[in-house]
Image (cartoon, grey):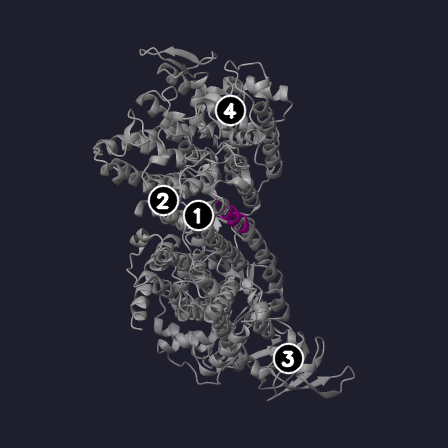
Amino acid sequence: MQTDLIQTSLLILVLSVLAWPFGRYLARVYRGEPVWSDFLRPFERLIFKLSGVNAETSLNVAQNMKAMLRINLIFFVWAFVLLLFQGNIPLLNPDGVPGMTVHQSFHTAVSFLTNTNLQHYSGETGAAYLAQMLVFTFLQFVSAGTGMAAAVLIWQSIRSQRTSDLGNFYHYLMLSITRILLPLALVTGFVLLLNGVPATLEGAGIAHTLEGEVQTVARGPVASMVAIKQLGTNGGGFFGSNSTHPLENPNVVTNIVEWMSILFLPMAMVFGFGYFTGKRKFARILFAVMMAGFLMLFLPTLYLEGQGTNEIAAMGISQSTGNMEGKEVRFGPGLSSLWAVATTCTSNGSVNAMHDSFQSLSGTFLLLGMMVNAFFGGVGVGFINMYVFVILAVFISGLMVGRTPELWGKKLESGEIKLAALVFLMHPFLILGFTAVASGIAARDPAMGVMDGGQGLNWLNNPGFHGFTEMLYEFTSSAANNGSGFEGLGDNTVFWNLTTGLVILLSRFIPIVIPLMIAGYLAHKKSTPAGPGNLQVESRAFGLVLWFVILILSALAFFPALALGPLAGHFS
Amino acid sequence: MASLFESAVLKEALFYSLKKFDPRVLFRNPVMFTVEIGAVVMTIVSVAGALGNAAAGETVGYNVSISVWLWLTVWFANFAEALAEARGKAQASSLRKTRQNTPARKLLPDGTETSFSSVDLRPGDRFVVEVGELIAADGEVVEGMAFVDESAITGESAPVIREVGGDKSGVTGGTRVISDRIVVAVTAAPGDSFLDKMIALVEGASRKKSPNEIALSLLLTAFTMVFLLVILALQPFAAFVGTELSIAALISLFICLIPTTIGALLSAIGIAGMDRALKAHVIAKSGKAVELAGDVDTLLLDKTGTITLGNRRATAFFPVEGVSPDDFAAVALAASLADTTPEGQSIVVLAQQANARILAAAGTGRTISFTAETRSSGIDLPDGQRIRKGASDSIRDLVQRAGHSFPAEATRKIQEISSNGGTPLVLSVNEQVQGVIQLQDVIKPGISQRFDRLRKMGVKTVMITGDNPLTAQYIAREAGVDDFIAEARPEDKMNYIRKEQAEGKLVAMMGDGTNDAPALAQADIGVAMNSGTQAAKEAANMVDLDNEPTKLLEVIEIGKQMLITRGALTTFSIANDVAKYFAIVPALFAISIPGLNVLNIMHLDSPQSAILSALVFNAVIIPLLLPLALRGITYRPIGAEALLTRNLLVYGLGGILTPFIGIKLIDLFLQLF
C-alpha cells in the first residue's frame, strides 16, 4: 500500500515535469514559431496540395466549424465502408475476418471517429489488419488531431482581440498530427516494440505448447496502434482485452510508458494553452484544479483496491496484495488503480484491469471521472470542457464581486450563458436519459426481446445494482467519449450499437461546436482592462471556486444515479 | 421611510401575493412555476389518497403536509416579490402624492390664461406659476426667474433659483414657487415624466428584466431542467433495481433540488435595488442603468460644486519685506470691504480673523470698482492712500507706470502660489507693492476619502475643470482624483469618454448644462441634476433629484449590491442541495436499500420526517432571506479576490452547512408531534 502510494505519486510527479516543457513546444508549433520539426513542412504542403485543401487562409468560427465537420464526415464514410466490406477486400486480411454488420459498422466507425473507441467487437476476430491500420490507427491520429485543433481555435480566440479570424482548422489539424502525434507515437511505438509488442503483417501464429496442445496466437501491427491509442486518448485496443493483453502490454516498463502516454498530452495541452495565450498563471491554476480533481478520484481508489473485498475474504482466501480480482498479477492494485483513474479522467478508455471487478465504491470514482470529463480530459476536448466550466464558474463568482461577470475583460451575457448551460445540460441529459430508457426497458423485458428479436439474451449479465451500474457505465463512457467498458454487457446488439452510437456522436460534436460559438462571441467583444474591482481568474480564490463548481454541478446531477448503482452496491 | 414590515405595505403585499398564484403571472418565473405545477400534482395525489388510493406507507396527513408546504413555497416567493413591489410603490407614491391634479393656469397663444388640470397638460403647453403656487408638470422655464422650493422632491429646505436660459431652467412638477412669476413650457406628458417611469420600474408588470437577470434566469432554468431529468430518470432506475418510489418523495426531492431560494427572491432583489435608488432620490430610467452602474470603470465629475466648494477663497496673506502682517491685513480689509464678490468677502473674513484694524469709517473714502480695463479694484481713503488689489499683471502695470519697481520677492510668491493651484492677488498702496493674497479652491471635506473608496472599487475618477492645467493638477492631487481634463470644452469631455470607451471601459458622467447633453448621451451612465436643463435630463439615464454630484457613488454601490446579492443567493441555493441529498436520498430508498442509510449522516428520525424537514427548510429559508434580499448584501471595496473569498465563505460554505443544521432542527421539532 505504502509502496504503491510512493511509486504512483512519483510517476505522477515525473509525468507533470515532462509535460511542462512539451507544452512550450506545443505552443511554438501552433504559433508558427521555428521548431526542430520544421523540416516536415514540405511534406505537409505536399499533402495539402494533393488534397486541394487551402490551409493558408485564416477562417472565422463558422468556416472553421464547417471545415471540421466536413473532414469528419469524410473520415466517417471511409471508416464505415471499409468496416462493412473488410471481408470482401483481399488485402491485409491474412486471417480472413468477415465484414461487420451495418449497425456494428456504424457504431464502430462513429466510435473511432469521435476518439471514443468503445468497442463492440473483439480485435482478434472482428477486425482485419486493413481495418486495424487504415481505419482504427488512422482515425486514432485524426480524431486526436481534431480535438487538439479545436482547442487551438479556442486558444486563438482568447489570444486575439476583436477579430473573427481564428486561423485555419486544417492547418492546426495537420500540425497536431505531423508535429506532435507522429513523433511521439514513433518514440512510444519503438519502446513497445523493444519490449515485445508485435508489429507484423503476418497472420495469427500457431504455437505448440509443452503439453502438446496447439494454440492460435493472434498478432498483427500492434505496437503502432497501441502507441497512438494511448497518446491520443483513444483507448481502442488491438485486442479485445486491451492493455491487459500480454502482447499489448507485456511488462511493467510498457505499462508505465503506456500509462504516461494516457496523461502526457492532456497535461501538456494545459501548459501549451498557457504558453500560447501568455496566460501562464491561469494555466497553472487550471493544472492545479485538474490535478486536485485527479487526486481526489485516485487516492480513494488506490486505498480501496489495496484492500480485499469482503466476499473473497469470506471464502477464506488471503488478500494481502489487495483486491486482485480482474487485475493482472504483473501490475497489481497500485498500477491498475493509477491506470483506471487516468483512463476514465482523460476519456482514453484503455484498460489494464477489469473495471467491473473493482470495488463498487471505486466504480463511483471511475464514473465520476467520466461524468466530469475535464480533470485533464481528452486531448484538446478536455480543455474545451474545462473552458465551459470556467465560464459557468466565472458567471457565478463574477456576480459575487459586484460586476457583470467578465472572462479576461469580456462580459459574459445571456448569449454565452445559454450556450454554456446547454453544454452542461447535455452531458447528464444523455447519460441519465439513455440509462433511464435502457433500465426502463430492461425492467419490463429483461431478455430485451422487443429490441433485438431475442438475440440480446445475454445483453445484461448481472441484475440489480451491479447490472444498473453496467448500463450507467456504458452510457457514461459513451457520453464522455471515453470508450472503456465496465464489461459484463452483451453489447453487440442493435440496441446498444445504435443508442451508444447516437450518444457518442452527440457528445463529441456538440461540446466542440458550442464552446467554439461561445469563443467566437467572446472574441468579438470589447475587453475591459483589469482593475482591482475585476475578478481575476488568475487567482487562487477563483481556482477554488472552479473546483467546487465542477464538483457540485457534477455531483448534483449524478448523485442519485450513483447512489442506486455503485453506492448501493457498496453499502448493501 | 416605511419600515420593512409596515402594516399598510404588508397588507398590500399580502393581497398581491395571492394574485400572483395565477399561472399566467407565475409563468414569468420558470423556477417557481415548476414548483406550482408540483404543488398541483401533489394536491391531486393527496386528494386521491384521501379517497382511498394512498400509496403504501403514506398517510393522508403526510401527503397533505407535503402539499401544504409546496403551496407555501410558492406563496413565500409570491410574497417576496409583492412585498418588494409594495415598498417600491409606497416610496414612489409618497413622491407622487405631491403631483396629482394640480390646477394649472395654461397660457394660450393669444396671451390669455385658462384654468386647466395638470393631468391634461401636454408637452409644448405653457403655463404660468406665481408665488405660492405648485408647478403643475415637469418643464423648462421660458420666461422669468423664481425661487422654487423643491423640498417635496429633494427633502432639501433651501429654495433654489430657476431661471430662463442657462443651466438652471428645469423645474419638476409638484414643487412650489416661493417668489416671482415664471412661465413654464411642459416637456413631458403627465404619464411620461421621470417619476412615472420610475414607478413603472418598481411595478412587476411592466418591469423589464435586466441583462444580468436574464442570464441568471437562464442558468437557473438549466439547473431546473437538470433536476427534472434526474427525477424523471429515477423512476426507471428504481424500477430496474426493484424498488418503488412514491410521488410525494419524488416531488419533494425535485422541489428541494431546484434553486427555489434564488428563484423566489430574484425579482425581489431587482425591485429592491430600484427602490433603494429611489430612496437615494435618484430616478433611473431603467433597471439596467442601475445595474450597469455597478460596472463603471471611469467616472467624470465637474470640479466646481463636486470636488471643491464652489468658489475660491483667500487662504493666506504674504506681505513683502518691510510691511508688517498687521498693516497688510488692515489694507487688505479696506480694499475688500465694498467688494461683494465671494472672493472679496473671503478676504474680509480672513482679515477679520487676523484682527485687522479698520483704517476708515464705513462709507468714507471712494470705492474703485472692478472694470475690465483696469482689472483691479480698491478704495481711495480720505487720508489719500490709494489701495488697489488685482491680478498680478494689472498691478505690475500700475506699479511700473508710476516708476516703481515690482519686487522680485512678490514675483517669486506669485509663481509659487500659481504652481500650487492657487490664484495670487497683488495688493498695492500708492502704487507700491505691499504683498500677495493667496486665493485657493477649497476642497470639500471628506471628498478624498470618497475617491479613495472609488479607487478601491476599481473606479477611476476624472475631474473636469475650466482651470488651467497647473491649477487643475494641484486640485486633482489634493482631492485624490486619478486624472483631470483642464480648460475643458464640451468636445474635450466627449473625446475623453470616447477614448475610455474604446479601451473597453464603462464610463459614467454627471452633468447639468445643455452643453453636457451630448457627453451625457455618449457616456454609458449619464446622471443629470434635476436642476439641470431639460436637454441634459433627456440625454441622461438617471436624474438626481437632490442635485448632489457625488450621488453616483451610491448608485454604483446599489448596482454592485444587486449583482452580489444575486450571485450570493444563487451560490447559497445551489450549495444547499448537498445537505438535501443527504436528507432525502437515503429516505427514498430506506426500505428497499437499507444499506444507503449510512448516507443519513444527520440521523433523521424517519424517512417521512426527513423528506418533510427538507421541504420545510426549503420553504422557510425564503422568508428568512427576504430581508437580506430587500436590503442587499453590503458591498465592501476590499478588492475582487478578497470579496470573492469572503462571500464564498459566507454563502458557499454557509450554504453547505446551514441546511444540515436547519433540517436536523426541523426534524427534531417534528418529532414532538
Q: Is residue B80 visible?
A: no
Judging depth in this view, the residue of B651 and A128 nearest the camera is: A128
Amino acid type assigned to the residue bearing label 3 in the image: Ala
Disc number placed over residue A136 in the picture, else none: 4
Is B84 located above or below residue A264 in the figure?
Answer: below
Of the image marks 4 and 2, the number of the one nearer the N terminus: 4
**Disc 2: which residue:** A566
**Disc 3 and disc 2: Cα gap in Å?**
72 Å
Q: Which mark lies nearer to you, 4 or 1?
A: 1
Tags 4 and 2 on a common chain = yes
Q: Is residue A253 above or below residue A463?
A: above
Tag 4 near tag 2, CB within 8 Å: no
Q: Judging from the image, what secondary structure is the residue with disc 4 in?
A: helix
The region drawn magenta spans: A418-432
Q: Secondary structure at mark 1?
A: helix
- The quarter of the rendered structure image containing the N terminus of chain B is bottom left
- Mark 3 or mark 2, which is nearer to you? 2
Do marks 4 and 1 share a subunit?
no
User: Residue B51 location, x and y as percent?
Assistant: 48, 71
